[in-house]
């Protein structure tokens, strides 16, 4: 997913270098989850693979440690992002319904 302009200042200054390192050197130009090769047709979807870098465990842009980043094809990145959206939605609904983890105040 492209970086939204309003989020760009939350990424580290060397984001482009980190992104290139993860995609081209560490991942060897393949999706780190399914192995699909960059710039080739995806073995499942048939669409051209363009590797992007995903935040895996912590989706805040500034959480750019290399262990939190993965080079992913569109299919894996979309699945990962969809799961994160579902998780955030569950948390939001839980908070709105009063079932969230609000601090208990005595009195
Ligand atoms: Zn993949």
Image (spheres, rainbow, N blue to C red):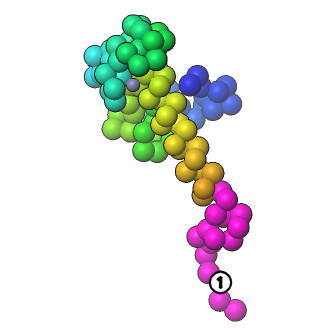
Q: Give me the residue at 39% from left, 33% from top.
A: 69
Q: Give me the residue at 55% from left, 51% from top.
A: 87
Vertical position of residue 31 compared to residue 89: above or below: above
**Magenta stretch containing residue 104, yes or no?**
yes
Q: Where is the N terminus found, in terms of image quarters?
A: top right
**Magenta stretch containing residue 36, yes or no?**
no
Per the image, the residue denoted by label 1 is: 105
Residue 72 is situated, as x and y percent measured from the top left of the image, at 41, 25
Residue 51 is situated, as x and y percent measured from the top left of the image, at 43, 18
Q: Where is the C terminus found, in terms of image quarters?
A: bottom right
Q: How many marks?
A: 1
* View extreme (bottom): residue: 107
Q: Is residue 43 left or right of residue 79?
A: left
Badge 1 marks a residue whose secondary structure is loop
Residue 43 visible (yes or no): yes
Q: Give me the residue at 65% from left, 57% from top.
A: 92
Q: Is residue 27 left or right of residue 16?
A: left
Ligand 1, seen in the image, is in the quarter at: top left
Vertical position of residue 101 compared to residue 30: above or below: below
Q: Is residue 62 left or right of residue 65?
A: right
* View extreme (top): residue: 40
Q: Give me the residue at 61% from left, 68% from top.
A: 100
Q: Main structural element of the magenta stretch: helix, strand or loop?
A: loop
**81 and 104: which one is in front?**
81
Q: Is the CB of mark 1 within 8 Å of ligand 1?
A: no
Residue 33 is situated, as x and y percent measured from the top left of the image, at 34, 30
Residue 53 visible (yes or no): no
Asked which quadrant contains residue 66, the reply is: top left
Magenta-colored span: 92-107
Q: For the residue carrying disc 1, how many other residues have a C-alpha within 10 Å: few (<14), some (14-19), or many (20+)? A: few
């Amino acid at each position: 997913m492209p970086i939204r302009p309003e989020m760009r200042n939350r990424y580290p200054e060397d984001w482009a270098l980190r992104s290139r390192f993860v995609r081209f050197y560490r991942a060897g130009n393949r999706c780190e989850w399914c192995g699909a090769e960059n710039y080739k047709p995806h073995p499942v979807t048939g669409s051209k693979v363009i590797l992007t870098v995903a935040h895996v465990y912590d989706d805040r842009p500034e959480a750019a440690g290399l262990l939190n980043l993965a080079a992913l094809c569109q299919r894996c990145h979309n699945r990962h992002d969809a799961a994160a959206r579902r998780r955030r939605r569950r948390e939001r609904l839980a908070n709105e319904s009063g079932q969230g983890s609000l601090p208990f105040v005595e009195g």
